[in-house]
Image: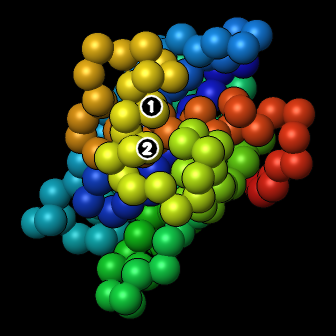
Amino acid sequence: MLILGIDPGLAIVGYSLLEKRDHHYLVGDYGVISTSTESSNTERLQHIYSWLLDYIKKHKPDVMAVEELYFSKNVKTAIRVGQARGVILLTGAQANLPIAEYTPLQVKQAVVGYGRAEKNQVQQMVKILLKLDEIPTPDDAADALAVALCHGNSLGLNRKWGG
């Protein structure tokens, strides 16, 4: 199974592509989609949509796993991230991908075994579980790998499907 993991954002979207074979994973790809702060929000959302749609067409994942929005004290930021997340979900739906959504707590629980784990603990476990030489950078890419791992570890368990 090929899992596309997404850590949503407007300035930076983390993405990852993991292949799950039985009980182990192969890292296909990971990185970030960056948008310019000098572009309008509409242009930034369009960039995320176009980039992600091309990526899905090229790599043909079986499922998209997306982290749910973590409530921020900055409402303006939360709204912008929510808009980007909506574009990401729409892109997956238009590509006919099943979409799984996970809270940050669920991701941490699945990867570290503790829902209140610190960011660096999650990153260390991503490195260990995927047998990487170093922690993936930037943080958004590591988070996208964690989301994909969460989905892979959740298969056959109680899942929350959207779309």
Around disc 2, counting alpha carbons within 10 Å, would you say few (fewer than 14), some (14 to 19), or many (20 or more)? many
* Circle 2: residue type: Val
Mark 2–mark 1 Cα distance, whole angstroms, equals: 6 Å
Q: Quadrant of the C terminus?
A: bottom right
Q: Quadrant of the N terminus?
A: top right
> Residue 55 vs residue 105: left or right?
left
Tag 1 residue: 126
Tag 2 residue: 122
* Circle 1: residue type: Val
Instruction: Locate residue 58, reporting x and y percent.
Output: 51, 19
Placement of 60 over or under 32, stated as above or below: above
Placement of 46 over or under 69, stated as above or below: above
Around disc 1, counting alpha carbons within 10 Å, would you say few (fewer than 14), some (14 to 19), or many (20 or more)? many
Instruction: Locate residue 119, reporting x and y percent.
Output: 36, 52
> Residue 117 vs residue 124: left or right?
right
Placement of 39 over or under 113, stated as above or below: below
Residue positioned 45% across, 50% down in the render: 7
